Structures are given as C-alpha cells and as structure tokens.
Amino acid sequence: NAEAADALAAVKDADRKHVFHSWSAQELIDPLAVAGAEGSYFWDYRGNRFLDFSSALVYTNIGYQHPKVTAAIQEQAAKLCTVAPGFAVDVRAEAARLIAERTPGDLDKIFFTNAGAEAVENAVRMARLHTGRPKVLSAYRSYHGATSTAINLTGDARRFGNDSATAGVVHFWGPFSYRSPFYSATEAEECERALRHLEDTIVFEGPQSIAAIILETVGGAPGVLVHPDGYLAGVRELCDRFGIVFILDEIMVGFGRTGKWFASEHWGVTPDLICFAKGVTSGYVPLGGVAISAAIAETFARRPYPGGLTYSGHVLACGAAVATINVMEEEGIVEQSARTGAELLGPGLRALAEKHPSVGEVRGLGTFWALELVRDPRTREPLVPYNASAADNAPMAEFGAACKKGGLWPLIAGNRIHVAPPCNIAPEDVAKGLAILDEALSVADAHMA
Ligand code: PLP
C-alpha cells in the first residue's frame, strides 16, 4: 500500500544518506529495510517474511520480541533506566548473580561491558596484569571482535584490513578435522597433534612472555568448529603447566546456543576467564562481560583494576539480562536448543548432505550448525575460495539469494552456511527452514566442478 511504500522510501533515503554501515563499502550495499520482527521471523515493508536462520548476528537466542522480556525492559525503564557504575543496584547485582551461578568453577565475579569486543579487551587486560606477561595466543580460525586488541587477536581475514598493531598477539592452528592443518586421519590424532603444535608454539615463544591463550569454546564465525574431545582439557593442562591464563570466548556460544548455558560444560573444562555478550540479553539491550576466577579477582582485591566503562553494568541492560535468563530457565530454552539439535537440526541437515553433493560436511550441536559447501567432496575444494572477491563469491551469493527467495534469512560465511536459528525455534519452523535449504542447495550443486 501507499503508506508502506512511503515509509520504506523514507527509511531507505535516511539510511543511505546518514548511516555508515559496518564492514562495507558504503556505496556498494543495499540494506534490506526491516519493518518488524517477532519470534523466529522478521519482515520487510513489502510484506516479505523471513525465517531467521541467523538469529540476527547469532544473538536472538529467545527470538525477537519475547513478550516477558520486552515487558521487563519497560518495567525497568519506568523504575530506573540508569545509574553510575560505581553504585550497588538491585538489578545489576541480580544479573551478576544469575550469570555467576551458571558459569563453571569459581568464576563468580562479573565485570560488565557493553558488548563482546570490550569483554575480550578487558579479559586480556586482566590476564596481562595478573601474570605480568605481554603476549596472547589465539587461533587463526577465530573471531574475537573489532576493537584494537580484539581484531588483532582475530585470526580470520577481517584482521587484514586492520593489521597495524599485531604486537603482543601470536596465532596458532587449532584442530579442524575436515581441513586438518596436521594431516590427521582421526579426531583423536587431530586433537593430539593440535595440542603438540600449541605446546611447541608456547615453548618457542617463551612461556614467561605469554599472559593468556584465548579460544572460542566452539569456533563461531570461523565455521562452527567443535573441538575434538580432549582438546580443551589439553589446553587447560598446558595453561596450568606454563602459568598461562586460559580465556574462553563464549560470546557467540554462551546462553543456550550449543544446548548448554556455556559450551565449556560439554567438556567439563573450567577456564580462568569467560567472555560473554550476545545471548545474555538476546541482544534486546547491549550487554557483555567477563566472568572472573577467584585467583584473578584476588589480584584486584587490594590493587585497583585499571579499567572501566561509563555504562559498565548499565541498569536497563542488566534488567534485560535478568529477564532473559529467567525466561530461558522457565521455558527450558537451553534444553530445547539441545533437543532441537539432536532430534531435528542434526538429522535434518545430515539428510540434506546425503541428497546434495555440494555439502561436504555437516557439523554442530544445539542450535548451532554449519554446512561446508564444496566444489568436489573428494578434494574438499571449497565452493568459493577463502576471502573470495565479489566475482569469485558468485556461487555463494546465488545460494544465499535462493534462500532469501524461499523466505529464509541465511548466515553465510565464506563457503559455508551457518545454521543458527533462535534456540527456541518451533519444530515446524525447523522443518520449513530445512525445506527451503533443500531447494537452495540445488543452486550450490549446480556450481560444482
Ligand atoms: N567474540 C566472538 C566469538 C564473537 O562471535 C563476536 C561477535 O560476533 C565477538 C567476540 C565480538 O562481539 P561484539 O561484536 O559484541 O563486540
């Protein structure tokens, strides 16, 4: 109708004139104008509805506009929107308590940030001050955020455009059986060789210079990389042996994404610091933070911590966290995520792989999966090259367009589609999403060698 057309024109016009978008050449993009969202869907001004298999940027773990959480945010806004970070406030204390109750081991103190990258910055700062050492080790296949330290810790190609200040960061290869950097034949071999490689890196860099090892508990942006059993425990052991702080980045995978509150629970491994963000509020209000072990908290018991943020523990964001965590608990959303993975998404995606030769591998857990699309399943040559130019990326762009045409919003990264719907997606929407993927994968099949 005419009203919607006018509204669309106004949004597009102001957006194009005044919004500077992330990660983009500003004149080469055409952002979809979103008119609204609810549950697992969002829609545009033309009435097209999209089943969101990306959970925005993998953070709407409870779906859009959960009525209990939007109500709690409104209530908190009416009561108290903000107060300086130095005060004790009921809702901030409650958010910290609810998070600390869910983190493993003695990670019982919470430093709040606005989002993920700041959590990483502060975790690294804590590790450096705690150990008195300068370097941090991180995996090539990783994403840790886009601030100065975080983007340099990031291993993937988004680091390239920022590669001016890598000082203090050393990258290593984590395990990845499907594209093994260690020529392993089994998961156990991959695990053992990856740990040996990490140990060698530590020894040759000099353990006395290494403050921390940071790892995504399950690699998110790099492709839903589920570490082989024993790897995280092995890294824990290396950190203990060499006096290195072990930081797990659970920013993408915490709060139900993998079917546990924190993904480290799958392997019973307790790091020294956990970074979180995204799912803690389902993104309704931005919030992140660091959960801190007793030993590291002790370092700052009588010595001031030299870091802080105007909005650390923002009251409205903490209100959103309390409501989100309570809703996830009451509605069994973490367990639902695990069940959806085991009973619907896992089997459904494996069935698609059987049918479509372009699917080289299916991996994941909970509501967090990836399909690795290849030109040839024997050689495992990716459907598009690493860090592909726009021209080389055409097969994935066509595949993505086919998903959208079918009504599914995909999360595409390199030669992969990541499947990350809300953790509480309804079974019928899983089925619908799988049917759309089934059609779209024929487009990928057509691009094979
Ligand atoms: N770490 C991981 C594992 C992430 O996935 C992300 C964001 O995608 C970040 C850090 C950065 O978080 P933010 O974008 O909130 O700064």
Image: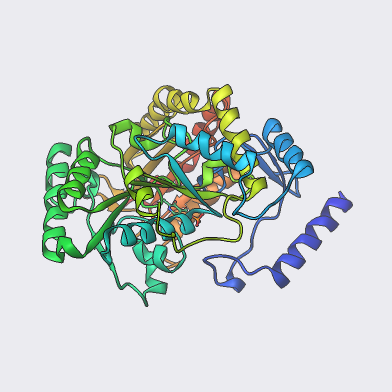
Q: Taking the image as drawn, is residue 54 in sight?
A: no
Rendered location of residue 371, percent (x, y): 38, 42
Foreground residue, 316 or 401? Answer: 316
- The structure residue drawn at horizontal position 44% and vertical position 32%, both measured from the top left corner, is 102
Measuring from the top left, give residue 43's x and y in whole percent. Answer: 69, 44
**Position in image of residue 9 (x %, y %):** 80, 61
Would residue 375 appear left or right of 67 to someone viewing this image? left
Determine which quarter of the picture holds residue 28. Answer: bottom right
Q: Nearer the viewer, residue 316 or 225?
A: 316
Near-viewer residue (108 or 338): 108
Q: Residue furthest right?
A: 2
Q: Looking at the image, which residue is at 56% across and 65% down?
A: 22
**Quadrant hosting residue 323:** top right
From this view, report whether residue 106 is shown above or below residue 213: above
Q: Residue furthest bottom?
A: 164
* Residue 422 spot, x, y in % from top left: 54, 36
Please, which colouring scheme is shown? Answer: rainbow
Residue located 13% across and 45% down the image: 184
- Residue located 12% across and 48% down the image: 193
Does residue 100 show up? yes
Check the image and report above or below for 440 versus 268.
Answer: below
